[in-house]
Image (spheres, coloured by chain):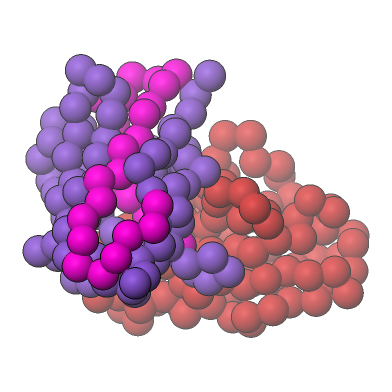
Amino acid sequence: EVQLVESGGGLVQPGRSLRLSCAASGFIFDDYGMHWVRQVPGKGLEWVSGIGWNGGNIGYADSVKGRFTISRDNAKNSLYLQMNSLRPEDTALYHCVKDLSHGYFDLWGRGTLVTVSS
Amino acid sequence: EIVMTQSPATLSVSPGERATLSCRASQSVGSNLAWYQQNPGLAPRLLIYGASTRATGIPARFSASGSGTEFTLTISSLQSEDFAVYYCQQYNNRPLTFGGGTKVEIK
């Protein structure tokens, strides 16, 4: 089955860290760029970060630059997001998404919820 | 950053009627625009890319047009499963940006 399954979300205090993971299956993972997109429940979508098929072409939203790090392990068909210095405004559902070509997304995971609160 | 503005925020339409959604970019994105549909509790689904190309499996009642800064998504005859939130997204420049969404609700 073609799918993306996120994990690693949870409740964390401001200033702490969290690492999200995304397990991909059913497609050739290292043929595609991958991204993280977040959504505050009931609100819109915000692109967080993206990475090319070979680990290059990395980009971040200004809101997370310097705090978040995206990476991937093609041998494990996995995508990661290391989130440091978390803020309450980072609270959202984080989706792992597959880049079909040049930045639009044909496969979305259901998301993992990150809540930043004291 | 390219700002994407969608209108209207909410569109009330009767089943079987036509719905027209708009998306405007703050600067030209060429044809590098995608549309997504999101039903409650589900992840978004790709409908359109390249401003007018339907994604795999998307019914023909969905059509889209536009280039540059003005884009339109049309649903020709609304079915029950089409009542959802629709987002446009530009991928011409990073950061990739989404519109705020249009909710299509039953009239």
Up/down of A45 relative to B28, above or below: above
**Most foreground residue, A36 or B102:** A36
Is B79 displayed left or right of A34 in the figure?
A: right
Relative vertical location of residue A24 with respect to residue B59 in this rendering, above or below: above
Please indicate, yes or no, whether residue B76 appears anywhere in the rendered image: no
**The colour assigned to chain A within the rendered structure:** purple
Question: In the rendered view of the protein, which quadrant contains the C terminus of chain A?
Answer: bottom left
Q: In the rendered view, tell whether residue A68 sits above or below residue A52.
A: below
**What residue is at 84 percent from the left and 53 percent from the top?**
B79
Which residue corresponds to the image point at 32% horizontal and 60% vertical from the top-left? A12
Residue B87 screen position, x and y as percent: 53, 64
Chain shaded red? B
Number of on-image labels: 0
Estimate the x, y position of residue B39 in percent, counting from the top left: 67, 54
Quarter of the image where one finds residue A30 = top left
**Measured from the top left, where is residue B88 in percent x and y?**
49, 64
- Residue at (44, 19) in percent of width and height: A26
Q: Residue at x 44, y 34 (%)?
A: A5
> Magenta region, mostly helix, strand or loop?
strand
Left or right of residue B33: residue B84: right
Percent of width and height locating residue A15 = 19, 67
Range shown magenta: A10-39
